Amino acid sequence: MAMLEMRDVEVSFSGFRAIAGLNLSVNQGELRCLVGPNGAGKTTALDVICGKTRLARGHVRYRDREIGNSEEFRIARLGVGRKFQVPSVFKELTVRENLRVGLCKPHGVFSNLVGRKSGESAERLEALACLVGLADELDHPASWLSHGQTQWLEIALLLAQNADLILMDEPTAGMTGAETHKTAELFNQLKGKHTLMVVEHDMGFVREIGDVISVMHQGRMLAEGAISEIERNPEVKRAYLGSGRISDA
Amino acid sequence: MTDTNSMRWRLTGYVLFCVIILVFPYILNNDYLLNKYARYLIFGVLSAALSFSWGYTGILNLGQAVSFGLGSYAMAMALKLRTIPIQTGAGGLPDFMVWNNVKALPWFWEPFHSYTFAVFAGLGIPMLLAFVLGWFMFRGRITGVFVAIITLAMLVVINLVIVDQQKYTGGFNGITDLSTFKAFGVGFDAYSLSTYYLVAGTLCVVLLGGLAITRTKLGLILQAIRDDENRVRYFGYDVASYQNFAFTLSAGVAGFAGMLYTLVMEFASPTFLSVQLSLSIVIWCAVGGRGSLLGAALGAILVTGVQGNLSESPTFLDTWMLIMGAIFIIVVLFLPNGLISLAEKGVRLLKHKSARETATHPVAGAAIATFDSKRVRES
């Protein structure tokens, strides 16, 4: 049984059908890349899963539970984490404080009022900062970080959250080649323990991390398979009009 | 470790301020001035409460004076019912009701015979009102300037109702001619030391308690909501509940400040929930520094203090408003984080100096080496 199942999902923004009958299923521990030309509905698909966007029709099932149109925080509590395209962290808080917010259990107002800091979580937090190379920045405000570091901080926040299903929207946007490579390594480590869905334009990055690639076009699933199959697929070539190969997109 | 270090500085500042306001009466032995400073300190409480919702959580409440006014009226109602019979009408009816041909005490005045009820009402009614309003606003994802407009509208409506219902509220004149509050055998006359200490003690509790709350994880989440509400939501926190907590707590503190204000002023008036006062709180908060409870409180004390002294001095009788205006503009332009940011800058300079002195310390090098080895193990 798949961990995440989307069946005949439809989303429309005042008449425009951003997603028109999307079917997608992702298994536990998989690293799934979601690619496609601009406007294919990749980001919208992630938005639907995490509750940001309402679906007009269809079903989204996560671990046999219908989550379509649930409130965002309820979906998040089930173990779905989301990284946004524009890196969003808490600018005025330090990196350490950011990570403490990310360690999100318990969720309630009053348990967080009386709860004490535990030494165990402090250690975990520092280990996370080391993992994404921010150990030296722990006590600096997040607004001091470079763009790439901000991206990593948000990824670390999701790891702190310990989400089972992590939705990443263009995690390497604005990163240098070396940074992108390091991110790919990190993702390969996470695969298995976590289930990842990554929307990405950088085909080099996709090649480094992807097992199965799903190609979306005009709100539908166009093709699915290993990267070599996808690159040979004539329909995919046609979708990326003018750019003979998907790699040039 | 910068984190705990700056915390130590902040705590020192807060404690120092509390000590100053607590020993103040020993330096200044003048009942009239004591009463005046008690008023300023109450404004400090009010401003710190706004800082909690605005500076920390990002909720700009332009209707803060609603809570303040309702608290003030709750206390005034209880004190009015205890005024000696000569000044109240037949059967203990408050004088203004007699003038307005009210025959019997209205039902909602009855429970105010009890001080305990009045104190709970002064806290509870503003909190309940804030909670209900907050429930609709925050569940409906209303943010930013719209929160400001809604709270301001709420203020205007409640002010109008109180002025309009003269029979029950004393209308334009408010509730005057009150008895002295007594609790645990202590009388709280407006010009007494006990009242000053009640006010100063409240400010200390609000500042230190508030600081403690901002240091919990809850406080951290509130600040995270201020920075990026949506990001917080996708971690599984119910943002609306957190916002409502800050909004309601702030209203409760403002309500308590209102009760104290009645003791100090010896009346309650619709001006206590006027738009003018409500906007003044925002100015105090901005001048002092909305991101700091102490800054906001200091802002209120400074602004109202300077305002009081300027407007009373014959030299500035015509120009004091202009001078105040100029001060606001200068602070907002050059110190967007308020006057408290000057103190923060000073502390940072001091720390920088001491950091340079310890930069060559061998332990620092060892720590960096440990980090590097850790990173290798992780990747």
Image (cartoon, rainbow, N blue to C red):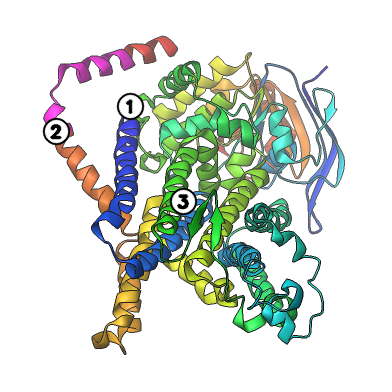
In the rendered structure, which amino acid carries the disc numbered 2? Arg
Q: Residue at x 55, y 17 (%)?
A: A188
In the rendered structure, which amino acid carries the disc numbered 3? Thr
**Residue A92 visible, this orientation:** yes
- Name the foreground residue: A74 vs A88: A74
| Helix, strand or loop status at disc 1 | helix
> Alpha-carbon distance for marks 2 and 1?
17 Å
Look at the image and give the residue range highlighted in magenta.
Answer: B355-371
Relative horizontal placement of residue B263, taking residue B154 as reference (left or right): left
Compared to residue A121, the image places residue B140 above or below, namely below
> Alpha-carbon distance for marks 3 and 1?
41 Å
- Quadrant in which residue A166 is drawn: top right
The residue pinned by badge 2 equals B356
Identify the main secondary structure in magenta.
Answer: helix
- Name the foreground residue: A151 vs A22: A151
Query: Neighbour class for label 1 at 10 Å: few (<14), some, many (≥20)?
Result: some
In the image, which disc is placed on residue B274?
A: none
Compared to residue A119, the image places residue B252 above or below, namely below
The residue pinned by badge 3 equals B202
- Name the foreground residue: A140 vs B220: B220
Of all residues shown, which one is farthest toward the bottom? Answer: B318
In the rendered structure, which amino acid carries the disc numbered 1? Asp
Q: Residue at x 65, y 67 (%)?
A: B77
Q: Nearer the viewer, mark 3 or mark 1?
A: 3
Q: Residue at x 80, y 42 (%)?
A: A69
Query: Neighbour class for label 3 at 10 Å: few (<14), some, many (≥20)?
Result: some
The residue pinned by badge 1 equals A136
Q: Earlier in the sequence, mark 3 or mark 2?
A: 3
**Residue B59 visible, this orientation:** no
Residue B366: percent from the left, percent from the top?
Answer: 23, 14
Q: How many marks?
A: 3
